[in-house]
Image: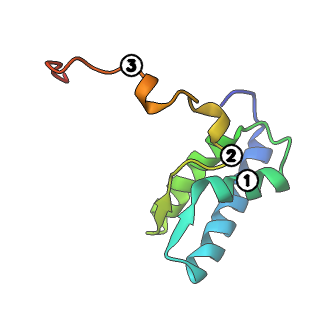
Amino acid sequence: MGQTVSGFIQDLVSKEIRRIVADASGDETMVSASALANQVMDIYPNCGLNAREIADQVMMAAARAGMAVEIGIGEAITPMLTKAPIANRARRPKNHVAR
């Protein structure tokens, strides 16, 4: 976590994430981590967690509930990703062997 988060606030955020995921599990077969993270950020805007940390917790809660999770780029996560077009990103040499 980027900032110090009190145990009480972390518990409130975790309970809210579990509640939102449980509510979504009755209606949908897949949840969007970024959309649910945005919902939590709206409820607890100064909780001390950033959107990515909340999205990670959403993904874990959804996985525990046996739900599929969309982890695509959403508004909550977009600022944390590179904006460079794919063609401009560094590429591995063709003879590169992953270790």
Mark 3 vs mark 2: give the one in front.
3
Residue position marked by numbered label 2 in the rendering? 76
Callout 3 amino acid: Ala
| Earlier-in-chain disc, 1 versus 2 | 1
Report helix, strand or loop for mark 1.
helix
Residue 24: image x %, image y %?
Answer: 62, 74
Whether 54 is drawn above or below 65: the answer is above
Q: Decide: marks 1, 3 in contact (CB < 8 A)?
A: no
Q: CA distance from mark 1 to mark 2?
A: 6 Å
Near-viewer residue (99 or 89): 89
Residue position marked by numbered label 3 in the rendering? 90
The C terminus lies in which quarter of the figure?
Answer: top left
Give me the residue at 45% from left, 23% from top: 88
Callout 1 amino acid: Asn
Characterize the local packing of mark 1: few (<14), some (14-19) or many (20 or more) Cα atoms within 10 angstroms.
many
Drawn side of residue 1 relative to residue 84, left or right = right
Residue 89: image x %, image y %?
Answer: 43, 23
Residue position marked by numbered label 1 in the rendering? 38
Any part of residue 12 in sight: no
Characterize the local packing of mark 2: few (<14), some (14-19) or many (20 or more) Cα atoms within 10 angstroms.
many
Q: Decide: marks 1, 2 in contact (CB < 8 A)?
A: yes
Instruction: Give the image quarter of residue 35.
Output: bottom right
The N terminus lies in which quarter of the figure?
Answer: top right
